[in-house]
Image (cartoon, coloured by chain):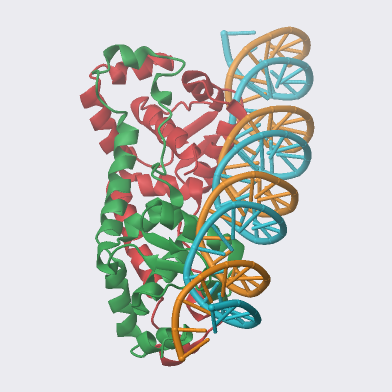
Chain colours: A red, B green, C orange, D cyan
Amino acid sequence: MNQGVEWAVHVLLSLAWVDDDVPLSTAQFARSYDLPPAYLSKQLQALVRAGLLESVPGAKGGFRLARPAGQITLLDVVTAIEGPEPAFVCTEIRQRGMGEHSATTNPGTMCAVNAAMRRAELAWRRSLASQTITGIRMEAEDHAPGIADAVRGAYGRV
Amino acid sequence: MNQGVEWAVHVLLSLAWVDDDVPLSTAQFARSYDLPPAYLSKQLQALVRAGLLESVPGAKGGFRLARPAGQITLLDVVTAIEGPEPAFVCTEIRQRGMGEHSATTNPGTMCAVNAAMRRAELAWRRSLASQTITGIRMEAEDHAPGIADAVRGAYGRV
DNA sequence: GTGCGAATACTCGGATACCGCGTGTCCGAGTAAGTGAGG
DNA sequence: CCTCACTTACTCGGACACGCGGTATCCGAGTATTCGCAC
């Protein structure tokens, strides 16, 4: 799995905690988490293209949440970074070479292997879609009560 | 996702259909599905290492199922090919650079982001573990009634 | 005809190259803020 | 004091290299078969 997913979620969490109209810049995130700024910027651009963030150009610019954190799911993030293609791609080897099966195969039916893998991936996507940034935020606050103020302080929002 | 997973499942399915003590060789599988024989061999070796297949050396050798197809799950196959490591790896960026959070973080608790991703991946693994080769076999036979005899015929088992 | 032994051909298995994609970096276009002068 | 235009500095955004893991391949070790020969 692409490492940018983890970065993206943490960035979105920070933006959720620093609930403000004034945006946060790539440089600030990179400094906070000790990440390569340029590469992080690339990932954030993907979030903008996916409509999760909106970018503010110019001095004192940066990124803002494009919609409330409660309406951003993990599936949105993963899809934005990894792309919409499923992890398992069926190459239909069942009807290569010896194509005898295909003769009796009921048309319109999917390869059973592909169907099984898609069921599993659907379960994964369902779980991702059921978890929002806000949910993770609450869980983190439960684990570390002072984290909200700590993050706001780390970004200069006293 | 590694392409070998699809190949492995189809090979296991073929072995389940051709229910016989005499093994099937890499060359036969490669011919049936039009796959590169050497690379396919590499994947089958992984299945042997994982204990899903047992190899028979020598002339007329090949591979046999190491245990009944009903006791081989998709999770077994994926783990054998992809390895046991989870797809999402948490690099703990939450406490790099500004480590202020960690001061208040309740010790022994996992990063909330990691926890969320692990929940999703657990759902995926649960679905994979609930589906056996036999289950896929039955579904395929439902889609294509004559497939069992077709496969047996393709491998010379008349 | 039968038993034995060597040659054989076929198999798996690990060691070895190739290549695409994720990883990492850089520089330019664009814009808001800041600054100074002029009215 | 207010307005305005210019300079400035900082931001995002896309275009450009690097390295590793999946992809693909080849050749050697080992064994069951098979053929031939002796009995």
Tell me the residue at 26%/37% (across/down): A135
Q: Which quadrant would residue B95 be assigned to in this image?
A: top left
Does B61 sit above or below residue A149? below
Left or right: D28 as drawn, with respect to A7: right
Q: Position of residue B22 (x, y in %)?
A: 40, 75
Q: Is residue A42 visible?
A: yes
Tell me the residue at 33%/53% (across/down): A124
Q: Which quadrant would residue B128 be assigned to in this image?
A: bottom left
Does B56 sit above or below residue D6? below
Which sits in the foreground, A26 or D7? Answer: A26
Tell me the residue at 34%/41% (across/down): B117
Q: Is residue A96 visible?
A: no
Tell me the residue at 21%/26% (across/down): A142
Which sits in the foreground, A87 or B129? Answer: B129
Which sits in the foreground, A129 or B43? Answer: B43
Left or right: A22 as drawn, with respect to B51: right
Q: Position of residue A143 (x, y in %)?
A: 23, 24
Which sits in the foreground, B101 or B130? Answer: B130
